[in-house]
Amino acid sequence: MTHLGARELIDLVLDEGSWDSWDTPPDRAGVSPDYAQALARAAERSGVDESVISGEGTLRGRRVAVVAGEFSFLAGSIGRASAERLIAAVERATEQRIPLLAAPASGGTRMQEGTPAFVQMVRISAAVARHKSAGLPYLVYLRHPTTGGVMASWGSLGHITVAEPGALVGFLGPRVYQALYGEPFPAGVQTAENLFAHGIVDAVVPPEEIGDVLDRALKILSPGEVEQVADPGEEDLPEVDAWDAITRSRRTERPGVRRLLRYAATDVIPLNGTGQGESEPGLMIALARFGDAGCVFLGQDRRGQTASLALGPGALREARRGMRLAVDLGLPLVTVIDTPGATLSAEAEEGGLAGEIARCLADLAMLDAPTLCLMLGEGNGGGALAFLPADRVIAAQHAWLSPLPPEGASAIVHRDTDHAPEMARAQQVRAQDLRARGVVDRIVAEHPDAADEPEEFCLRVGAVLRFELAWLRQQDAKALRLRRPDRFRAVSPGAR
């Protein structure tokens, strides 16, 4: 496979004729004659004067900054001159408040310069961190190959990270491993596809598609004016028995987060995993738009949860990545509750399930971003509660929330499961009960059951989400955060 050079990729992705280089000639003071000759040969062979090029252009008309590695210049290695160029570009993008696109391709630190070059990774990482702390997008496209100190610094700090198909991506260079240990590194580990499978990169995208992905992402990450959205209103709801609601919520035909996004969202960019080696099918993390309102979306996926693969601690760590993204990018966070319960297993205990539930609750309660929770279906146990703390809570008519499934509550109180319907009624688990106590703000009707009208139901939910997100964007985020924990007092009906 032929891999594009830095300028070829830039020409492919950015608008034609929009590229404006930020580069100045590198400082070669103090370079030895032999190293100077190597640099001159690299420049002649590659057509560039260093292993990183930087500048700005437009992507579908939107101004962006770019830093890209050129592997044909000394294997894309980072020396002091290329580090200075990279840091200057990141700082300029931050100062001018424009998104930064990074496309590394590198073997890591330049061995000809050794430790003085190696320690520049500290400064590069700090510059990227400052850019992100300013609320500016940092999007990374890992190209073939990206290894060593580059992968361990600016290659791994993206808000979103995608990789080139078939790219060698990892920390350890395979040639170094073989030289040190006398055997080849296991095949198939350091590939873009394997890193995606392990939740380290968000997607594997060919170069010809990366421009469209970046454009869609930036539409969500760079929200414009708040749109004016009419309140869709609420319907008068018939009384439904608690056990009937629970039974309906468990129907296999009931729409989950994937159908909700398909019918109701304007655009969806799925993300993947924690970025730290974990990914669970029971959680969907994405960037999404409802109307013009962008958000970070965390949805418990009923199709990805089975008896043998229930919601585990990795899914909650993935959710906490989404929470951090919302804060970093100044976006509202939408959580969706739809789970028969977190996994009950030795692995979950050893993986810190209880601690992850606690950290989700604490993070959401104090999150410096507007939050919206949708109770879509089943809401069983701590795995459900972990997604509840929000400034606004919307519920489907037959959604519910309980510390245990009613069968489990019956087993504790009555030592059988026959009293499950009675326990459901007594525990006030229904959306209507929670609305009466101030936990739920709005209920979306089902006619008479979402499973019987999935598209229409999802469109009604989408209209509510669009309105609520627009409303949240007009509020003072700090004031919302300060009020958030107290709204779950669950006071008696009529006490407010």
Image (spheres, rainbow, N blue to C red):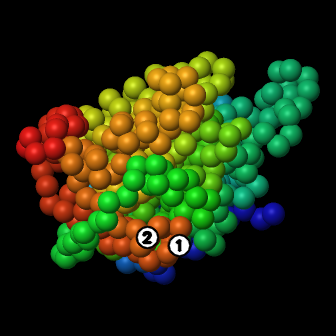
Residue plotted at (73% across, 51% down) = 193
Residue toward you, 81 or 237 = 237
Please identify the quadrant where the N terminus is shown: bottom right
Please identify the quadrant where the C terminus is shown: top left
Residue toward you, 157 or 29 = 157
The furthest residue to the bottom: 16
Tell me the amino acid under the disc marked 2: Pro
Above or below: residue 281 compared with residue 120: below
Q: Position of residue 275 (x, y in %)?
A: 56, 40
Residue plotted at (44% across, 54% down) = 245
Cα distance in 3D space between marks 2 and 1: 7 Å
Mark seen at residue 479? none
Residue plotted at (72% across, 58% down) = 165
Q: Are marks 2 and 1 in contact (CB under 8 Å)?
A: yes
Crowdedness of circle 1 by 10 Å Cα count: few (<14), some, many (20+)? some
Tell me, yes or no, if residue 188 can be seen here.
Answer: yes
Q: Position of residue 295 (x, y in %)?
A: 36, 58
Q: Which residue is mark 2?
A: 448
Tell me the amino acid under the disc marked 1: Asp
In the image, 37: left or right of 174? Answer: left
SS type, badge 2: loop
Q: Which residue is mark 1?
A: 452
In the image, 17: left or right of 310? Answer: left
Residue plotted at (59% across, 46% down) = 282
Crowdedness of circle 2 by 10 Å Cα count: few (<14), some, many (20+)? some
Above or below: residue 306 compared with residue 377: above
Q: Position of residue 478 (x, y in %)?
A: 14, 42
Q: Position of residue 321 (x, y in %)?
A: 45, 40
Q: Quadrant of residue 187?
A: top right
Q: Quadrant of residue 226?
A: bottom left
Tell me, yes or no, if residue 80 can be seen here.
Answer: no
